[in-house]
Image: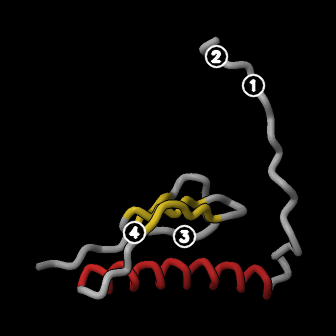
Amino acid sequence: MSKKKPVSFVPFANEADVTGIGDLTLENRLDRITISGDVDLTADVPGLAHARRLHAVLGEIVAALEARASSGELPAQLPPPEVTTIDNPFA
């Protein structure tokens, strides 16, 4: 049985990448990573694979944030996102 190659997910690199672990979804943004859904880390081989993948992705996110902190590029806090209202195109 061949191992699946992990999907490339470079934290904070773009507004397009999405990766999944079980039913957990990690969505890339330039200024944030959105994590939604759930994953069961079961005490079996698939659970170990999910746990390892989650650990790897979170490690990459932490490393990217630490690199920004070291270079002085990590703000104390992001401003709230700008919210705009548009007319309903179906009304």
Residue nearest the observer in this picture, 8 or 36 = 36
**Of the residues shown, which amino acid type is indicated by label 3?**
Val
Q: Outermost residue toward the top? A: 91
- Which residue has dot 3 on it? 10
Spatial distance from mark 2 to mark 1, Cα to Cα? Answer: 9 Å
Amino acid at pointer 2: Pro
Can you identify the residue that label 1 sits on? 86
Quadrant position of the C terminus in the picture: top right
Label 2 sits on residue: 89
Q: Residue at x 40, y 69 (%)?
A: 21
Query: Taking 52 as reference, is 68 left or right?
Result: right
Number of other residues with Cα within 10 Å of mark 3, as a class: few under 14, some 14 to 19, many 20 or more: some
Question: Percent position (x, y) of residue 8?
Answer: 44, 68
SS at circle 2: loop
| Separation of marks 3 and 1 at Cα, in angstroms | 32 Å
Q: Secondary structure at mark 3?
A: loop
Please say if the residues under marks 3 and 1 sit with CB atoms less than 8 Å apart: no
